[in-house]
Image (cartoon, rainbow, N blue to C red):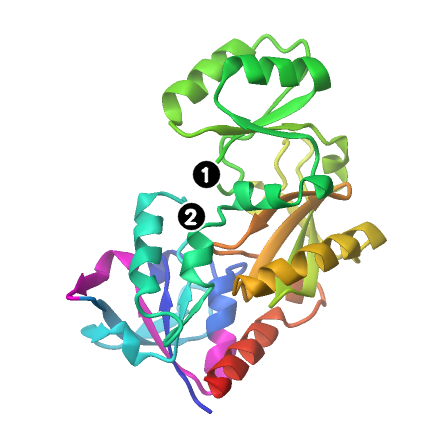
């Protein structure tokens, strides 16, 4: 059954197709005969309860520098699609949250992947705290006294913005680091929301594992190893992708969180694990599909489309 699918994403001309998960999903959907359309969240509008966007049909091809062809844009009701992939990248800010409110009006009649209500209620660095026994010691606050007490207890810590993404503004502070006061002041001025403070995990030097789950089931993994001179393993920050298998602890983590992901309608999730510690559950625009497949892993994009097709067939 060919589906009409719209992809809500960042400007398609700006993506790097080599590692872009949204592009991988589009390639797979097109190969299955689904009709793809494209729009950006800036073009969305709601009038009298109906949600519209400026939408164009799109064809994609795996050719760097020539990866798409767009048809004519036209104003279309999003209820006219069988499914919508909500794939714009964070930041998870009011612009992002507003898009979830609009899409809530059409889901589940039009299947939105991932469920916009639960995406709104599950920011990466907060949703993960549902499973505190799987995490490293973690504090969420902007109170200096709380941070100082946490630092006194653990010595070596990491500070990062609660709604940060892509490894931006992630800092390690050792017990004797004299930069703490300046860093606190900078965070206080820059971020209005609380921050995440965690015990530093020295195992990060061996990699920060991105594990993909589709409808709550394991769908592939890649180990992201940071550069020798950087704390962050995100591939956009210079991390190197390495093939990997799951440890027994990582399988336990997947089994523990899988039912909660499925219950919330999260068809595609990327979790981050360092040294057997769950650090993030990424539900907004999780990445990793192309890296996993390039290293000989499963076709997670195919698994996502299998679930979408099953859900539409049952609707």
Q: Position of residue 74 (x, y in %)?
A: 18, 74
Q: Are marks 1 and 2 in contact (CB under 8 Å)?
A: yes
The C terminus lies in quadrant: bottom left
Q: CA distance from mark 1 to mark 2?
A: 8 Å
Which mark sits nearer the N-terminus, 1 or 2?
A: 2
Q: Secondary structure at mark 1?
A: loop
At 69% from the left and 63% from the top, the residue drawn is 220
Q: For the residue carrying disc 2, how many other residues have a C-alpha within 10 Å: few (<14), some (14-19), or many (20+)?
A: some
Kindly state the secondary structure of the residue where label 2 is placed.
loop
Expressed as whole percent of the image width and height from the top left, the position of residue 30 reads 46, 81
In the current view of this chain or complex, which residue is farthest to the right? 248
For residue 129, which quarter of the picture? top right
Does residue 84 lie above or below 88 as drawn? below
The residue under label 1 is 163
Residue 300 seen anywhere in this rendered image of the structure: yes
Residue positioned 44% across, 22% down in the render? 187
So how many labels did they put on this image? 2
């Amino acid at each position: 059954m060919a589906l009409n699918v719209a992809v809500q994403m960042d400007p398609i001309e700006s993506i790097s197709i080599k590692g872009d998960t949204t592009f991988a999903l589009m390639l797979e959907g097109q190969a299955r005969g689904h009709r793809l359309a494209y729009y950006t969240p800036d073009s969305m509008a709601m009038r009298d309860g109906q949600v519209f966007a400026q939408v164009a049909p799109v064809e994609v091809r795996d050719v760097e520098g020539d990866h798409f062809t767009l048809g004519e844009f036209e104003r279309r009701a999003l209820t006219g699609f069988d499914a919508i992939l909500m794939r714009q990248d964070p930041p998870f800010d009011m612009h992002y949250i507003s898009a979830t409110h609009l899409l809530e009006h059409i889901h589940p009649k039009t299947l939105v992947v991932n469920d916009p209500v639960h995406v709104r209620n599950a920011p990466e660095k907060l949703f993960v705290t549902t499973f505190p026994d799987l995490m490293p010691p973690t504090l969420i606050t902007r109170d200096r006294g709380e941070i100082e007490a946490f630092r006194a207890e653990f010595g070596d810590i990491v500070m990062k913005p609660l709604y940060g993404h892509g490894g931006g503004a992630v800092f390690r502070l050792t017990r004797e680091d004299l930069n703490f006061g300046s860093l606190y002041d900078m965070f206080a001025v820059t971020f209005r929301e609380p921050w995440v403070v965690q015990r530093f995990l020295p195992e990060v030097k061996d990699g920060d594992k991105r594990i993909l789950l589709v409808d709550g089931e394991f769908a592939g993994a890649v180990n992201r190893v940071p550069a020798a001179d950087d704390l962050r393993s995100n591939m956009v920050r210079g991390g190197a992708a390495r093939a990997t298998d799951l440890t027994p602890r990582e399988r336990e983590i997947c089994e523990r969180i899988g039912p909660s992901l499925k219950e919330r309608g999260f068809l595609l999730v990327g979790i981050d694990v360092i040294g057997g510690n769950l650090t993030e559950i990424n539900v907004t625009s999780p990445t990793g599909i192309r890296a996993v497949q390039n290293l000989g892993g499963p076709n997670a994009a195919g698994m996502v489309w299998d679930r979408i097709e099953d859900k539409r067939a049952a609707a």
